[in-house]
Amino acid sequence: RRLKDLRAGGIRISLEKVLADIEQRDEIDSNRKISPLKKAEDAVEIDTTNLSIEAQGEEIYNIIKQKGLHFH
């Protein structure tokens, strides 16, 4: 998506450069001294690559139910 957005804005850039820039950004965000971007210890990762929005919602709902959590 980032590559498409940049190219739509007239920026000529390779996929490799976009990926390198994202990796560099993530490294900086994860290692900054103030409020580093870190995954919570009890976080649940969901691979949404092949899931529709509806399926993503169902997956989240099922995880919440499995953990015995409640929401309003």
Image (tube, rainbow, N blue to C red):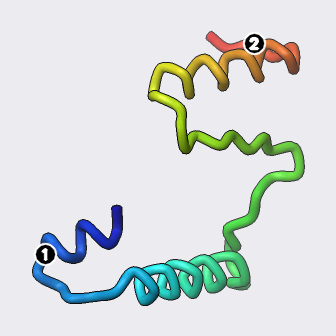
**Secondary structure under the numbered disc 1 in the rendered image:** loop
At 14% from the left and 70% from the top, the residue drawn is: 8
- Residue 15: image quadrant is bottom left
Q: Quadrant of the C terminus?
A: top right
Q: How many marks?
A: 2
Q: In screen coordinates, is 30 left or right of 49? A: right
Amino acid bearing label 2? His
The label nearer to you, 1 versus 2, is: 1
- Residue named by callout 1: 9
At 66% from the left and 25% from the top, the residue drawn is: 60
Amino acid bearing label 1? Gly
**In this picture, is 29 found above or below 2?**
below
At 77% from the left and 23% from the top, the residue drawn is: 63
- Residue named by callout 2: 70
Q: Marks 1 and 2: CB-CB under 8 Å?
A: no
Label whose residue precedes the other's in the sequence (1 or 2): 1
At 53% from the left and 37% from the top, the residue drawn is: 50
User: Of 64 and 13, which appears nearest the observer?
Assistant: 13
Q: Mark 1 and mark 2: span between their CA atoms?
A: 44 Å
Q: Quadrant of the N terminus?
A: bottom left
**In this picture, is 53 found above or below 9?**
above
**In this picture, is 21 found above or below 49?**
below
- Residue 59: image quadrant is top right
**In this picture, is 33 found above or below 2?**
below
Q: In screen coordinates, is 40 left or right of 72? A: right
**Secondary structure under the numbered disc 2 in the rendered image:** loop
In the rendered image, residue 61, in percent from the top left (x then y), is placed at 67, 17
